[in-house]
Amino acid sequence: MNIKIICVGKLKEKYFKQGIAEYAKRMSKFAKFQIVEVPDEKAPESLSNAEMENVKAKEGQRILEKIKDRDYVYALAILGKERSSEEFAAEIDKLTTYGHSDIDFVIGGSLGLSPEVLKRADTQISFGRFTLPHQLMRLVLSEQVYRAFMINVGSPYHK
């Protein structure tokens, strides 16, 4: 199985990198895990709606270039469906049972995801209505994917 997090922008904070590396190491017995960063589009603070859509479109194109045709894609979106950890684990288990060995998670830039990326996604997932820094979301998502594997093998990690 291959798990890929595709995200916009570079991760700069060392402590986030260390946390993600720890979960990547733990996941290595279940799946190949990788983070793919695409460049963010430089944009001034105040943008018109058309300029915002243009930024999302450019970032979206970069994201779509990293997704293979057969990949199952989760788009992280505020309006996505919330799931419990157990529901998420069951979903991952079902995907692997039915032959989806490449699962991608997409985290957009500061303006969100383009309509094209949302259309390509097989499902949208939300981690709640909070706004979280995208760098932190990478760590949270990494932990939840690891937790899903642990739930699926009956580990006491998830209590």
Image (cartoon, rainbow, N blue to C red):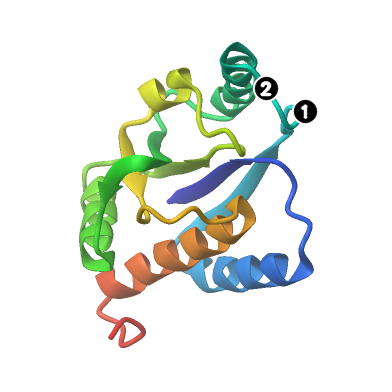
Point out residue 152 in the picture as x, y percentages from the top left corner.
26, 69
Tell me: 35 left or right of 83: right
> Which label sits on residue 130?
none
Point out residue 3 in the picture as x, y percentages from the top left corner.
48, 50
Which residue is located at x 52 percent, y 34 percent?
Answer: 112
Residue 23 position by quadrant = bottom right
Residue 16 position by quadrant = bottom right
Tell me: 51 left or right of 141: right
Which residue is located at x 44 percent, y 20 percent?
Answer: 115
- Which residue is under mark 2? 47
- Which residue is under mark 1? 44
**Relative to the observer, which residue lies in front, 138 or 25?**
138
Mark 1, other Cα within 10 Å: few <14 / some 14–19 / many ≥20? few
For marks 1 and 2, give the CA distance.
7 Å
Residue 149 versus residue 78 in the image, above or below: below
**Relative to the observer, which residue lies in front, 80 or 121?**
80
Residue 79 versus residue 50 in the image, above or below: below
